[in-house]
């Protein structure tokens, strides 16, 4: 068993929430395991809520299930089964029309709350772009950026009720979600209309985060607060973004080494069972531990160094073109 095989095995052994099902399926796709991605997508469709949210496990998230959308679209492309097409349409309709949102259309992260979280960017932007709604993808990034981003760093949570930040800390994971979302969007949809703007913003955020890197190559959980714990997964998320950007040409080639170095630092935290240790840990993500997303991002970062072949990129983009 290779080290990546062990990380994948550990990922499949971890209990997963809706977004973690999604990033697990994305890792399977990037590993070339479309068979596994199909099974993960089928499970997400089986748990689709009546309102359209994929992979619902009775959690309060309003947007997290959309992370499964890419795999559901890939499953439709592979099988032609209309069940997957219908599931993707219902998830898209929820985001476009029915999910709770602010007056300007920016989606709230939780049901029953009026909060904007950095995490949402990853959950919805790639799926919206892949589904042919670049307009909505751009609008979501813009709405989150206005509320959360200053000087290249994202705060974690904005309260629409108070019109102020509820969690102003520059959480590594939140910034990782943003740059990884942009990287995945530009990889899946190379012709994205706002490509140059998205690429420039990803570089701005990535550079701001890299300036806060620890001497050991990792980051603090709150990037600019050395009193917070040393954390593993942000380095993997930044590695993914840096490596994809360099491979796909929207970051200078020098970022390829940055991506390799970040992944190497995180790899030192993988134990003999393939478990990524020291990540911002499930289930509350407030202390060091383990998580499905950390497992998935290790795999995503490891595979990110190769540019997506043009035929695969075209096929992924076509996956969003559902029949009328």
Image: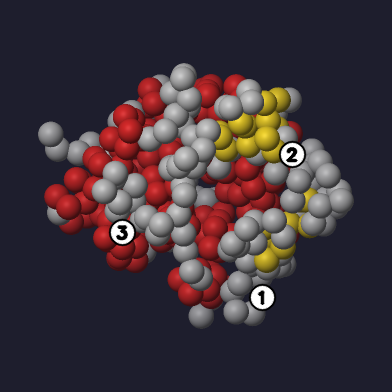
The answer to whether residue 270 is left or right of residue 1 is: right
Q: Is residue 254 visible?
A: no
Residue 280 versus residue 210 in the image, above or below: below
Residue 298 versus residue 225 in the image, above or below: below
Is disc 2 placed on a helix, strand or loop? loop
* Label pair 2/1, CB-CB below 8 angstroms: no
What is the x, y in percent for residue 128? 37, 34
Q: Which residue is mark 1?
A: 271
Is disc 3 placed on a helix, strand or loop? loop
Mark 1 to mark 3: distance in Å?
Answer: 32 Å
Sequence order check, earlier mark of 2 and 3 = 3
Is disc 1 placed on a helix, strand or loop? loop
Q: Which residue is mark 3?
A: 47
Q: Which residue is mark 2?
A: 169
Q: Tell which tag, 1 or 3, sits nearer the viewer.
A: 3
Disc 3 crowd, CA 10 A, few/some/many (<14, 14-19, 20+): some
Q: Quadrant of the C terminus?
A: top left
Sequence order check, earlier mark of 1 and 3 = 3
């Amino acid at each position: 068993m290779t080290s990546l095989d062990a990380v994948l095995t550990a990922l499949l052994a971890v209990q997963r929430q809706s977004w973690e099902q999604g990033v697990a399926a994305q890792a399977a796709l990037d590993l070339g395991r479309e068979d596994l991605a199909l099974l993960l997508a089928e499970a997400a469709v089986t748990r689709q809520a009546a309102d359209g949210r994929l992979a619902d496990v009775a959690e309060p998230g309003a947007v997290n299930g959309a992370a499964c959308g890419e795999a559901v679209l890939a499953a439709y492309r592979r099988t032609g089964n209309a069940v997957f097409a219908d599931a993707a349409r219902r998830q898209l309709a929820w985001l476009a029309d029915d999910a709770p949102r602010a007056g300007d259309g920016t989606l709230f992260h939780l049901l029953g709350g009026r909060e904007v979280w950095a995490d949402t960017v990853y959950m919805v932007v790639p799926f919206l772009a892949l589904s042919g709604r670049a307009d909505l993808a751009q609008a979501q990034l813009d709405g989150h950026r206005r509320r959360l981003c200053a000087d290249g760093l994202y705060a974690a949570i904005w309260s629409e009720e108070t019109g102020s930040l509820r969690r102003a800390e520059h959480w590594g994971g939140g910034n990782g979600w943003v740059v990884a979302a942009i990287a995945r969007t530009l990889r899946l949809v190379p012709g994205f209309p706002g490509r140059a703007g998205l690429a420039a913003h990803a570089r701005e955020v990535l550079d701001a985060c890299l300036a806060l890197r620890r001497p050991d190559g990792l980051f603090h959980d709150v990037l600019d607060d050395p009193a917070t714990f040393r954390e593993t997964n942000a380095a993997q998320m930044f590695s993914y973004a840096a490596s994809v950007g360099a491979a796909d040409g929207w970051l200078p080639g020098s970022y390829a080494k940055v991506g390799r170095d970040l992944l190497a630092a995180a790899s030192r935290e993988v134990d003999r069972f393939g478990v990524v240790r020291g990540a911002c840990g499930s289930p509350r993500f407030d202390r060091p531990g383990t998580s499905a997303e950390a497992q998935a991002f290790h795999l995503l970062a490891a595979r990110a160094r190769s540019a997506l072949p043009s035929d695969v990129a075209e096929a992924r983009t076509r996956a969003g073109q559902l029949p009328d």
